[in-house]
Amino acid sequence: MSFSFLAREAGHVHVCGHRGYSLCYPENTLPALEAARTAGATTVEIDVVLTADGEPIVLHDLTVDRTTDGHGFAADLGLEQIRRLDAGVRFDPSFAGTKIPTVAETLDWAKAADMGIVLEIKEAERPDLAADRVAALLRATGTLDRVIVIGFDHAVLKRAVEHHPGLKTEAITHARHADLIGVLETCGAASVSIELDMFHPDDARALHEAGFSNRLSMPRPDKLAEYWRGGRDPLPKIVQWIVDGLVDSISGDDVPFIARLVRQAGHAS
């Protein structure tokens, strides 16, 4: 059966681990992805940049400084240099020895684990090449159906869809557009990522009527705590949106928390 990012086709709302279970594991690593699956995720969001030799790797930043024991731009480092970096020790010494995975390795994991991948193109210098390399890997690994390519650069998404038939894309938005469906149609996207503060039930209904899926991006727990300290609780309305069939996927760093929300609404996998 083909993987679907639409809840009504999948039979459940997707729980999406943002960079894996990044609250408790080193982000964008295979341990974080596997931990997200164990905690109830059915999809994971990863970030992709290219090495100097054009290999797509799973890394959020353009440099390796923040998340590894190395230094410099990933685009200036060959794959073998990337392989020698430790992507776990900065997060916690207990994760020492964890490596930056390649996209190919991550796709193999997703296929074996029956997981969906939300793949964001973070590559800034060669974004079109990154999309081309990713599309080639999806075809080679037979994972075209379980991956959706996302990004802020809608022009890159538009080109990717035009050059790679069958590729699914999702446009990231940080605003409530007056014509959201028009935005998606223009860039050929099948889905949209919407932040909590910009999610509106009317937009979700219109998206579903037009055949588009959506992914609700949840704030980190410390940001949610600001709501609660101020006497506001967004959770009941989120649960109601799920109950009403308005949400296809919920993404965030705290995977068990999101999984509980989805179970509370009765839409867990």
Image: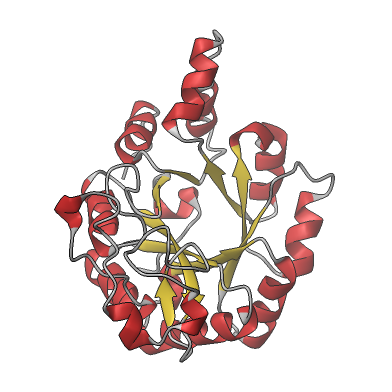
Q: Residue at x 55, y 42 (%)?
A: 216
Residue 43 on image: x %, y %? 38, 56
Residue 239 visible in the current orientation: no
* Residue 249 position in % (x across, y down): 48, 46
Quarter-wise, where is residue 211 in the image? bottom right
Q: Residue at x 42, y 63 (%)?
A: 65
Q: Percent from the top left, x then y, of residue 189?
A: 66, 65
In the image, 24 versus 206, the foreground residue is: 24
* Quadrant in which the C terminus is drawn: top left
Q: Out of 95 and 245, give the one closest to the viewer.
A: 95
Q: Residue furthest front?
A: 71
Q: Residue at x 30, y 68 (%)?
A: 110
Q: How many marks?
A: 0
Residue at the far top: name it: 231
Q: Position of residue 105 (x, y in %)?
A: 29, 77
Q: How is the image coloured?
A: secondary structure
Q: What is the quadrant of residue 221 in the picture?
A: top left
Q: Is residue 54 placed above or below 236 in the rendered structure?
A: below
Q: Furthest residue to the left?
A: 94
Residue 97 in sight: yes
Left or right for 147, reference 244: left
Would you say 238 lies left or right of 177 here? left
19 left or right of 233 in image: left
Give the quadrant of the N terminus: bottom left
Residue 204 against residue 36 in the figure, above or below: above
